[in-house]
Image: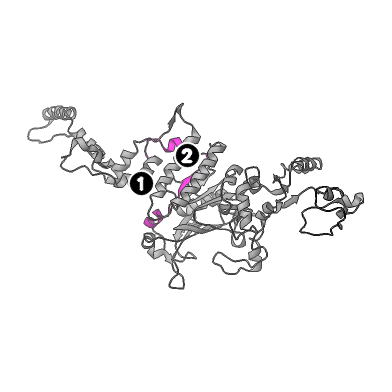
Amino acid sequence: MYLSNITIENFRCFGEGPKNFEMSLRPGLTALVGENDVGKSAVIDALRFALGTTDQEWYRLDDSDFHQEGEKASTEIRVNCKFEKLNEVEKPAFLEYLTYGKNPGDEPILYVNWTASVARDGARGRPYRRFEVNSGKSGDGPTIVAGARELLRATYLQPLRDAERALSAGRGSRLSQVLQQTKAVKEHGDPYPEDGEIDRGNLSNLSVLGIGDLANDLMRNNESIKNVTGQVNEHLRLLRLKGEEVASSIDVSGSNDPEDVRLRRLLEKLDLSLAGGAGKLGLGSNNLLFMACELLLLANEDAGSRLLLIEEPESHLDAQRQLSAMKFLQEKASEKKIQIILTTHSPNLASAIDLDSIVMIRKGRSFSMARGQTHLDESDYRFLQRFLDVTKANLFFARGVVIVEGDAENILLPTLARLIGCDFTEHGVSIVNVGGVGLRRYAKIFQRADADGEAKDKDGDAKDKDEGTKDKEIDIPVACITDMDVMPNCAPCIIGKLEKDDEWPTEDSSRRWKAKKHFGNSEEALA
């Protein structure tokens, strides 16, 4: 299954009703881009609260998480997650929580409605927070129990993560959690036989738990341990009263605990680290190792959420490793059917991500760059896939965009802007040099397909006119500026555009050249 839609109300910068946040997603990778403080991290955190995370890290809801409109703070946060394309293992697991369509052939949908509200203790009147997780499109279905919620947990990689610590041995280590859920660890190998009879020359067939049980058995039967036990019992014999029959025994702590507990304790002894020719490697390499480890866990899941949330994957990575990591994530998302939602501030990463997978967040709204959502046609997508490089991808993070034809405009316009007191950098304006006349291809990124059509809600129903308008346009001013590229009047004959006796061509929008004569002969006409 995959997360196809999320709606957030009254959480941080997102309000309710027409001011809520709604985003549709596709399978595979989705990259959230945009300037700071537009809500990218709020989307990730809302999913963490609503679904939980596999690391089970405890984090609390703060007063500042409730949206505030003026002096009034909201009292209820609502997050609605819609999951589609459940497989044959997932459908029985969520059977009582599924929503079915009107037609017999409609695929069931899983809605997860997470609500956090401020309530008051009836006896003392003290405020407290109440959390509910319900199913159904409007949250009116059965409460989703803890067992089912375990299947919804997403994997989360926080920004500026300490990957080395997460992969080090220790109680509750992330590495032990990943390994314990991996089929290769859970299912490979034979258990240690209860009678202790085992071929000592073929111990490689033992499971991890079997190795632990073997070690426990060897400890119990070790001659030095037996000798110490005998010495203790000898002293105890001298201290006990007549007729008392007591004796001591030494056993391995936790050897009788449940299997999952014993396995976890064994795995917590393991480290995962990298070493190169120069010795221990740094934060960047360890972060790549951490991502590979997490993807291993997701790739082995048969049922439930295969959702990976990554904030700022560019952290600690140089430019080339960023590109390598993004290529790896996109390939694994497609190959292993893993859904990845990431946030980034890196034009380098944005240039390496398929345009179909980019969602721009702007003033509490989501704007998908996917086919059918913009004015771009198929040839535009192919063109931008080749030429939307790192120097041009900064348009996804700007408050305003100026698209220019070449180096002259690229140098001149920022200088002119500074001279008139409108410095581009201070105003968050990006200048994009496309190195040619294909300016419109880049400008069409910001033009929405539904800007002139009927707006639809997430289920395909028509919205009210005012409600639909909010999603139609990206509120980013875009200017396309070129030089005149006008040739002297004698040039068309020299370069073969005209013969000497040909009539001078009239205005024609399909002609790719113009001369000064098309603009008149006065200086005013040429200005």
Q: Vertical placement of 102 versus 321: above or below?
A: below
Q: Position of residue 33 (x, y in %)?
A: 59, 49
The secondary element bearing badge 1 is classed as: loop
Which residue is drawn at the image coordinates 17% and 43% (left, top)? 194
Q: Position of residue 60 (x, y in %)?
A: 48, 48
Q: Which residue is mark 2?
A: 288
Q: Position of residue 66 (x, y in %)?
A: 56, 53
- Residue type at mark 2 is Leu
**Highlighted magenta segment, given as a residue range:** 146-172
Where the N terminus falls, by quadrant? bottom left
Of residues 453 and 277, the one nearer the viewer is 277
Which residue is drawn at the image coordinates 88% and 55% (left, top)? 501
The way the protein has been coloured in the rendering is one colour
Seen as rendered, the residue at the extreme left is: 243
Which residue is drawn at the image coordinates 31% and 39% (left, top)? 266
Q: Quadrant of residue 422?
A: top right
Q: Earlier in the sequence, mark 2 or mark 1?
A: 1
At label 2, counting other C-alpha atoms closer than 10 Å, the crowd grade (few under 14, some 14-19, many 20 or more) is some
The secondary element bearing badge 2 is classed as: helix
- Residue type at mark 1 is Thr
For residue 121, side relative to residue 443 (left or right):
left
Q: Which residue is mark 1?
A: 182
Of residues 214 and 262, the one nearer the viewer is 214
Q: Vertical placement of 289 versus 330: above or below?
A: above
